[in-house]
Amino acid sequence: MSLFKDDKAEQTIDQREYVTGSEREQETPLGFHEEINERALIRKIDWHIVPVLSILYLLSFLDRTNIGNASLFGLQPDLGLKGMQYSACLAIFFAFYVLFEVPSNMVMKAWRPSMWLPIIMVAWGIVITLTGIVKNFQGLFVARIFLGITEAGLFPGVSFFLTLWYRRHETNLRIALFFSAATVAGAFGGLLARLINLMDGVGGQEGWRWIFILEGILTIVVAIASFWMLYDYPDTAKFLSPAEKAFVKDRLHLDSLVVLHAFLDYKIWLLSFIYIGALMPVYAFSLFSPTLIANLGYTAATAQLLSVPPYVLAALTTVIAGFLSDRAGRRGVFILGFSLLGLVGFTMCIATPNPRIGYAGVFLGAAGIYPLIPLIVSWSANTMGGSLKRSVGMAIVISIGNAGGVISSFIYRAKDKPRYFLGHGVVIGFVAMTFFLTCILMLILSRKNAKRLAIAEARNGRPWSETEKLEQEERGDDADYFIYTL
């Protein structure tokens, strides 16, 4: 069975309307689109859009986290890094990543995704390649600055881009599929680094330098090819017929709402802190998991190999969570469940020196925190009305969340090994923050939905007309007809 399967009936689309005593979606046939098989069309879009985006994000995550693998193979002593200099190089990436996310999304919306995304990918590929020839702390520090600038636009850009192709309750599985590439990058990166390090001495270069050089060249090659693999929007996609373009436009119109000032929406800021509580642990895990496993008593080479299985499990839970969340039309309850799984995992890591229990905790921790990212990003998109608000609002959420990368760079200190009480404790605290803030947001949105149900009761279940929607369009997702995903 394909993960892209849509369970809605053929030739119909779901329309989110309030009906008496229910928050469920009702299906509304589009008679003038009877020739279109919706399920087949969505699968067609899936296969043209999602695999390419997944490859781009796999390389993005591989390039930003391969410094952890390089460190395990001698980067720090070869560059003469001392004290907190390595952590500073990790942190500066996230500082500039955060600064450039919102501007990048605005540029992409004003221009063309099929041009903007490959251009920034070529740029970061060049940066990561040149990282392989740095000679000291200053060179590595500057390289990480430019890597943050050039990579900043991919994840928020792609997350927004998907909302222009899919309806609200279709996005999480697609975001989960493309984000699962991050877990593949973690597993693949460890194996690849282990093999590339065998080139130690080739061309007079250390093995860790070849990790950057070869992975950077691979990114540039894929970036150039992506100029011909990416599409812009449904109405310009060459793989869609005119009838299919019209159908996609009409089904997305049912979800379109007006722009509000994203920076003034407290829900966006609440989601930002929910996101940072999940993303900081993900970055901490991706940057330090080989080191954490090595300090359980394994050699560097063995630790690289043992870091692969937790990522495989995380990839599975990420895709499963996305599939089930879209099927259920819910986000919050899944965030709560996977947050608890992550808390159990990292508590196991901090509670005992037993390496077997610690390694099992690494499995559960990864399986719990990675699914949170697409769940929260999808939830953010589901609470924002209007494409411009989604563009800016999602960039705000993601940029604030990525500030967690700065924190993650400093919490696993060498002097704390092998138990890393500070690092595990901070991760547990952040995941707990995501859990409790999710409870608060679910309560807020539930109360808002209850008020709108009362309005729907007064209308006796009569659907909102387009004229009535236009009268409230300036209210965006505060409009009486807008239902929040819980």
Image (tube, rainbow, N blue to C red):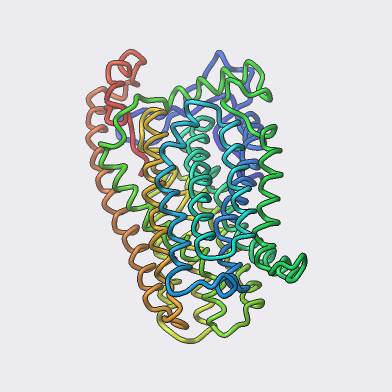
Apparent side of residue 245 relative to residue 217 in the rendered image (left or right): left
Apparent side of residue 42 relative to residue 330 in the rendered image (left or right): right
Viewer-proximal residue among 177 and 63: 63
Q: Position of residue 341 (x, y in %)?
A: 44, 66
Q: In the rendered image of this protein, does residue 15 appear above or below residue 382?
A: above
Q: Residue at x 29, y 42 (%)?
A: 267
Q: Residue furthest right?
A: 202
Viewer-proximal residue among 18 and 159: 159
- The image quarter in which residue 372 lies: bottom left
- The image quarter in which residue 433 lies: bottom left
Q: Which residue is drawn at 36% across and 15% down?
A: 466
Q: Which residue is drawn at 41% across and 25% down?
A: 256
Q: In the rendered image of this protein, does residue 56 appear above or below residue 295?
A: above
Q: Position of residue 132 (x, y in %)?
A: 64, 59
Q: How many marks?
A: 0
Q: In the rendered image of this protein, does residue 290 appear above or below residue 145?
A: below
Q: Position of residue 259 (x, y in %)?
A: 34, 26
Viewer-proximal residue among 386 and 69: 69
- The image quarter in which residue 9 lies: top right
Viewer-proximal residue among 455 and 238: 238
Quadrant the C terminus occupies = top left
Q: Where is residue 163 in the image (x, y as percent from the top left)?
A: 48, 34
Apparent side of residue 104 relative to residue 2 in the rendered image (left or right): left
